[in-house]
Image (spheres, grey):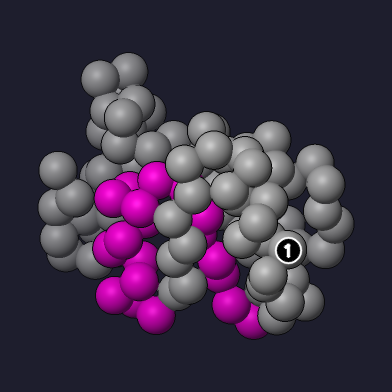
Amino acid sequence: MRIAFIGEALAFEPFRALGHDVYPAADPESAVQVLERLDLGKYALVVLTPEVAAARNRFTGPLFLVLPGLEHRDSGQGRLLAEAIRRATGRSTI
């Protein structure tokens, strides 16, 4: 099973290098368009940024997880995500 990342491209781009599917979306409407095109049956997990999280309400199937994007880095949440990405990939996203 695969993992899809939908939302802020900069936040999720490092996961593409790990072989995951990354789909940029700036708002819930564009995320819905992405989700409608995807075969959700092949994904065990779909990770979304908060800006597009409302799109998940129209879909069932995989587990949806909302992670803060890098725009939240000043709140501490973004720093935690950036550190997790750095540990997982060995690369800084900031």
**Residue 84 seen from this side:** no
Residue 11: in magenta span: yes
Quadrant in which residue 91 is drawn? bottom left
Question: For this view, does 12 lie left or right of residue 39?
Answer: left
Q: With 91 as the anchor, is 80 left or right in this view?
A: right
Quadrant location of the C terminus?
top left
Look at 14% across and 52% down and name the residue there: 92
> Does 65 appear in magenta?
no
Residue at 68% over, 70% down: 37
- Note whether 70 is above or below 84 in the view shown: above
Image side of residue 20 versus residue 74, left or right: right
Q: Is residue 69 left or right of residue 25?
A: left
Most extreme residue toward the top is 75
Residue at image location 30% in from the left, 36% down from the top: 70
Which of 82 and 32 lies nearest the eye of the viewer? Answer: 32
The amino acid marked with disc number 1 is: Glu
Q: Nearer the viewer, residue 84 or 4?
A: 4
Please count the marks in the image: 1
Query: Secondary structure under badge 1?
Result: helix
Residue at position x 26%, y 33% in the image: 79
Question: In the rendered view of the protein, which quadrant contains the N terminus?
Answer: bottom right
Image position, residue 66 (x, y; %): 57, 41
User: Is 55 in front, or is 63?
Assistant: 55
Stretch in magenta: 1-19
Instruction: Identify the residue under disc 1.
Output: 36
